[in-house]
Image (cartoon, rainbow, N blue to C red):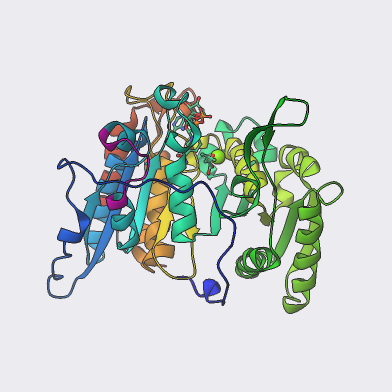
Amino acid sequence: MASFLQTNIRLSSNKIVPGKYTSLNNKYHAPSLIRCAAASPGKKRFNIALLPGDGIGPEVISVAKNVLQKAGSLEGLEFDFQEMPVGGAALDLVGVPMPEESFTAAKNSDAILLGAIGGYKWDKNEKHLRPEMALFYLRRDLKVFANLRPATVLPQLADASTLKKEVAEGVDMMIVRELTGGIYFGEPRGISINENGEEVGISTEIYAAHEIDRIARVAFETARKRRGKLCSVDKANVLDASVLWRKRVTALASEYPDVELSHMYVDNAAMQLIRDPKQFDTIVTNNIFGDILSDEASMITGSIGMLPSASLSESGPGLFEPIHGSAPDIAGQDKANPLATILSAAMLLKYGLGEEKAAKRIEDAVMDALSRGFRTGDIYSPGNKLVGCKEMGAEVLKSVDAKVPATV
Ligand SMILES: NC(=O)C1=CN([C@@H]2O[C@H](COP(=O)(O)OP(=O)(O)OC[C@H]3O[C@@H](n4cnc5c(N)ncnc54)[C@H](O)[C@@H]3O)[C@@H](O)[C@H]2O)C=CC1
Ligand SMILES: CC(C)CC(=O)C(=O)O
Ligand SMILES: [Mg+2]
């Protein structure tokens, strides 16, 4: 676990509607029965929970798993993979989005790789039976409050950006998103009837001081290891939760004199990301703003199919997933870009297992496959080779194999 997470925190008191976990049928192994085999001599062995989910989730996970396995094996790592259903897949199987067994497998693993969750089929489900609830239970119960979303324009993809090449090239930012608080978890929440007999929908943006402090510390530490610039994004001109956010972040700045702190309102930040994205080094922001701004930032890099993420807690396994959703519009067609998930596997190695060399192998292999001209449809430009999800994965795998040992 990265050292910047070694701070003492109290647990959030925010609650969401409790999930009804249930037993799986025998399609999946009960994780309590699975034991990690002893590592071969000279090798390290890790237990990885694979949660493919829905839509393109299983497609990108199957590709990323092979890449993870290959890169790991070249660095003396062995993996026991436990694949478990979450989201719509779990709803179809046992009627709940986050079965107890899947959660236990995740919780007991060394790291979790998740695909994506959701789909049209379950869109009309009651809220607690929506696939997306699995994500919220996982994030809340694993206490993975720190969500790192790097948005980097790779040199090979500068012309895949929807922005002008000169605006996009060289962009390299880290969005630090608070992941277990704010409006996605705040109470009161729900749909009720007001005094006029009219339906009202209620969501509450709420942050306790300790929740702001702990994510701000992660962000200051992150900025310190990067270019030393931290921009805190809020809406402190309107929202009380943002007023407290700005106050706490500002108070912590004196502990990080080497980091240059600035503040920006989220509407301006959305505009500045398009106007001049290179001004940003590290951004720290709340749950909902981070969700939205990272999707926006992904397009600067060429596609939402390029952005990985790491969600970290103070102890316990990290959760690693692409920032995109289940893309039901292209699911089952071998069109998904697997690079965000492959790069999430690299983050799993680096942040989850502390295996930087194996992580670097994956990053180098992605660069190499792109340099050799392979592109899925979302990042394709004329002159390159258009491939599907599986072939892109196979090319990255070839690059992992071909590379000399990575130096970190
Ligand atoms: N972490 C998760 O599991 C997330 C789940 N969702 C869920 O996913 C479902 C679809 O949500 P949307 O709003 O459509 O967002 P989305 O991210 O799934 O898709 C948005 C657009 O980007 C494209 N896209 C996404 N990933 C891609 C990839 N790897 N390669 C190529 N193109 C890609 C899709 O085809 C679509 O046109 C919903 O049920 C939503 O709730 C949404 C966001 C995150
Ligand atoms: C279900 C969504 C809130 C998940 C999402 O969009 C995200 O975490 O990026
Ligand atoms: Mg999102």
Position of 27 relative to 40 (above/below):
above
* The N terminus: image quadrant: bottom left
Taking the spot 65% from the left edge, 35% from the top edge, the residue there is: 165
Q: Which residues are magenta?
A: 93-101
- In the rendered view, does 194 fall on the left or right side of 103? right
Image position, residue 235 (x, y; %):
80, 48
Residue 39 in magenta stretch = no
Image position, residue 349 (x, y; %):
37, 61
**Of residues 23 and 359, the one drawn nearer to the viewer in this rendering:** 23
Can I make out residue 399 in this image? no
Looking at the image, which residue sits at the far right?
237
- In the rendered view, does 296 fall on the left or right side of 272? left
**Of residues 126 and 115, the one drawn nearer to the viewer in this rendering:** 126
Quarter residue 269 falls in: top right
Taking the spot 50% from the left edge, 40% from the top edge, the residue there is: 156
User: In this figure, what is the number of numbered marks?
Assistant: 0
Quarter residue 284 falls in: bottom right
**Of residues 80 and 381, the one drawn nearer to the viewer in this rendering:** 80
Image position, residue 200 (x, y; %):
70, 30
Taking the spot 72% from the left edge, 75% from the top edge, the residue there is: 256
- In the rendered view, does 275 fall on the left or right side of 395? right
Image position, residue 170 (x, y; %):
63, 48
Can I make out residue 269 in this image? yes
Position of 31 relative to 204 (above/below):
below
Position of 392 relative to 106 (above/below):
above
Position of 352 relative to 388 (above/below):
below
**Of residues 125 and 377, the one drawn nearer to the viewer in this rendering:** 125
Taking the spot 62% from the left edge, 68% from the top edge, the residue there is: 214
* The C terminus: image quadrant: bottom left
